[in-house]
Image: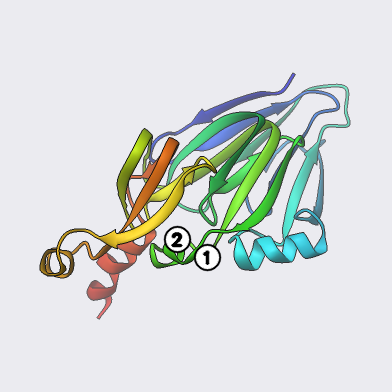
Amino acid sequence: MMNTEIKGAPSFAYIDVELGPGESLVAESDAMASMGAALDMKAKFNGGFFSGIAKKFFGGESLFVNVFENKTSQSQKLTLTQGTPGDIRMVELNNQSICLQPGAYICSTPGLKMGVRWAGFASWIGREGLFKLEVSGNGKLWYGAYGGLVDKVIDGEYIVDSGHLVSYDPTIKLKMKMAGGIFSSFFGGEGLVTKVVGRGKITIQSRSIGGLIGWINPKLR
């Protein structure tokens, strides 16, 4: 039976996987850090040619995914990671779905499917993208982001700073609003924020790539 463990969290998380005979795992094309020499790795379109194109240009994911399969009679080890330093989360879906920000997906078991759905202009203004990646079905999903990951259960309305929303239940809607009044929003440094509306679970990241870029740019001049 497949054994997995998230190590190095929360700053430099990675996934240690032990695939039993006949087991397989689907991962982003650049997620593999190391693997047993006997493992079989095959690249394929991310859900088919047209679906892969949609996920790449609208969902922020790779055109191809790698399928790691253990065709031997013994367990084989695999290590997966993400492109940015930060935490990784595992969720198990049972005929459920979850929405991810572009680039958050790392790997999943074969029973899950990935699709791209319209997220709305509010999501785009909030730097979450015009489209969202929706993962559904039965199986385990691993996703991550820059910084630590914090879970929140909301019932009503909740404010998340732009670029910090990582995942959320499909029943939750995204809207944009000013952080405060006009003066406070633009001179207080917050500007527009994301208002999540509904009932369900969200995951936010403690850091954002946009914030890192904003901190680095002035120092390069």
Residue picked out by circle 1? 130
Taking depth in this image into account, of 28 and 76 the one nearest to the observer is 28
Q: Amino acid at mark 2?
A: Ser
For label 2, the SS is: helix
Q: Which mark is residue 155?
A: none
Report which quarter residue 20 is drawn in.
Answer: top right
* Crowd class of label 2 (few under 14; some 14 to 19; many from 20; radius 10 Å): many
Residue depicted at x 81% and y 54%: 44
Residue 168 image position (x, y, % from top left): 48, 42
Check the image and name the residue furthest to the top: 1
Cα separation between marks 1 and 2: 6 Å
Q: Amino acid at mark 1?
A: Leu
Relative to residue 145, is residue 57 drawn left or right?
right
* Crowd class of label 1 (few under 14; some 14 to 19; many from 20; radius 10 Å): some
Residue 106 image position (x, y, % from top left): 60, 45
Q: Earlier in the sequence, mark 1 or mark 2?
A: 2
Residue depicted at x 43% and y 35%: 199
